[in-house]
Image: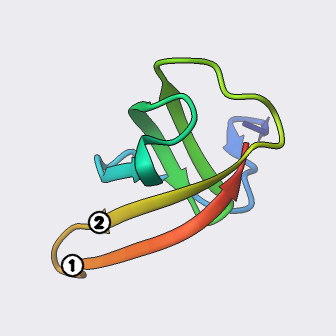
Amino acid sequence: MHVLNGEERRRYPRSKRRLQMLFEDNGPGILNHVDNISEAGVLCHTVKPVALMTRIGVVMDLPKPIEHRVETEGVV
């Protein structure tokens, strides 16, 4: 987080709203929980460590009023 004079300097705001999120096929590390999400990325915790630069498939169900499933790929 970049803070200057008490002001948030992130490029994209982060949401701490709980979302249902899964790694495809219970992928590397097995998802434990998600701390927050923004347009730039997701901060999540896994049961096992996942190596940097590992490509993962992610499935996320957006809550009401949107109710939409997002399927995408990411890199650790």
Which residue is tagged 1?
67
Q: Which element carries disc 1, helix, strand or loop? A: loop
Query: The N terminus appears in which quarter of the rendering?
Result: top right
Front residue (pair 64, 8) = 64
- Residue sitting at the far front: 25
Q: Is residue 13 left or right of residue 21?
A: right
| First reached walking from the N terminus: tag 1 or tag 2 | 2
Front residue (pair 3, 57) = 57
Residue drawn at (51%, 52%), measured in percent from left and top? Answer: 37
x and y percent of residue 66 in the render? Answer: 24, 81
x and y percent of residue 5 in the render? Answer: 77, 36
Is 74 drawn above or below residue 47 in the view shown?
below
Q: Which element carries disc 2, helix, strand or loop? A: strand
Residue 45: give its label: none
Circle 1/circle 2 CB separation < 8 Å: yes
Which quadrant holds residue 65? bottom left
Residue 61: give its label: 2
Amino acid type for the residue under numbered disc 1: Glu
Residue drawn at (38%, 49%), measured in percent from left and top? Answer: 22
- Work out how far the residue at label 1 is from the one at label 2, CA to CA, in angstroms: 7 Å
